[in-house]
Image (tube, rainbow, N blue to C red):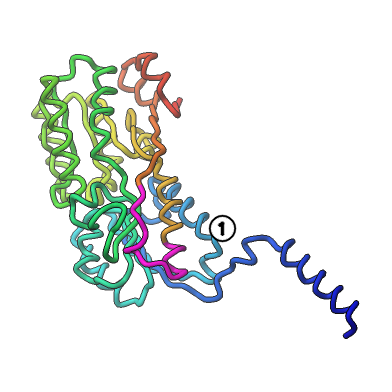
Amino acid sequence: MGLSQRRRFLIAASTAVVAAPFGLRAQPPRVARIGVLCTLPPSNPIGAPAWKAFYAELKARGWEQGRNLVVEGRYIEGHTEKYPIFASELVSAGVEVIVTDQSQGVDALRKATRTIPIVMSPVAAPVKAGYVASLAHPGGNITGVSNQANDLSDKLLELRLSIKPDLKKLGVLWSPNNAGSALGFKAGQVGVRTHGIEQVSLPVDAPAELGPALAKAQREGVEWLSVHPTAAIAPGLPQILAWATERHVMTDSIVSSFTRRGLLLSYGTDYNDIWRISATFVDRILRGAKPADLPVEQPTKFELIINLKTAEALSITIPQSVLQQADEIIQ
């Protein structure tokens, strides 16, 4: 090949590299295997939007199911007793990283492995729960996203009182066996006491306990029901909605998908955004990053969702001062 030919070849090759889409240049050279130990499967409408965001972000980073990504999925769907079983199965499956969306998932996985990377998506108060040494320096095989759920109690209380200033009894559906839920329940007690509100404990650690918890709420005269998005509680959302609508009880959660399914309001982090962030953790770990070196991220995007259909069914009026704060109004 002559000098002029070599020059033309090099120019053409350089042009081709520059013109090639970034995704093609960044394609992973192998098939990866990941595990997920989560509350609900992608087929469930409550969790579907978050899963869509998760897999879309992975695809954008070069990982696609059916091509170079194998997903070992284990979904609790209310059966919290399966956490240790599923955790052991995922470890035995030889996955490279495991994603979980509950404190109970982290607890089970920590007992099953101290080497396979674990990505929280998200988990409340991971430092207080002892999952990481600090947000900046996790220090072990766990990293991911903290949902800051325990920091939202004051804002939720403010919204409740704006809608029902004479609120006296707040019922809280929570899961004592879930570290994040337990911390959130405790954090919520402080604010309500200063306003003379009684916080009624409605513990649910298994689906069978939801009915008795709602019966207790009725006996106690609960006027407002706060719903923690735990693995034991989330599958029972239709039952919770039917109960609350029939008794004209107002409802809230930190999860927007619950409000889109019928709760009165939600205020919390954008879970779709959290799952996109979680996908970036998975990508970086698959490419060689160590969890101990990846700081836990705290979401900065929060959203207030109000369901006016539910408000109408409850025969209540949402003040304009609250509506003006909403990021989304369901009509």
- Residue 296 vs residue 41, the one in the foreground: 296
Residue at 38% across / 45% down in the picture? Answer: 46
Residue 71 vs 273, above or below: the answer is: below
Quadrant of res 99: bottom left
Residue at 27% across / 65% down in the picture? Answer: 140
Quadrant of res 103: bottom left
Residue furthest to the bottom in view is 1
Q: Is residue 25 visible?
A: yes
Left or right position of 48 against 190:
right
The residue singled out by tag 1 in the image is 60
Residue 106 in the image, given as x and y percentages of width and height: 24, 60
Q: Is residue 121 visible?
A: no
Residue at 38% across / 43% down in the picture? Answer: 299
Q: Residues within 10 Å of mark 1 (few under 14, many from 20)?
A: some
Identity, as a three-letter code, of the amino acid under mark 1:
Ala
Is residue 293 within the magenta segment? yes
Residue 173 in the image, given as x and y percentages of width and height: 18, 39
Residue 123 vs 67, above or below: the answer is: above
Residue at 31% across / 71% down in the picture? Answer: 116
Is residue 224 within the magenta segment? no
Left or right position of 250 against 63:
left
Left or right position of 179 against 294:
left
**Quadrant in which the N terminus is drawn:** bottom right
Residue 180 in the image, given as x and y percentages of width and height: 21, 47
Quadrant of res 261: top left
| Range of magenta residues | 282-297
Residue 320 in the image, given as x and y percentages of width and height: 39, 14
Q: Secondary structure at mark 1?
A: helix
- Residue 57 vs residue 52, the one in the foreground: 57
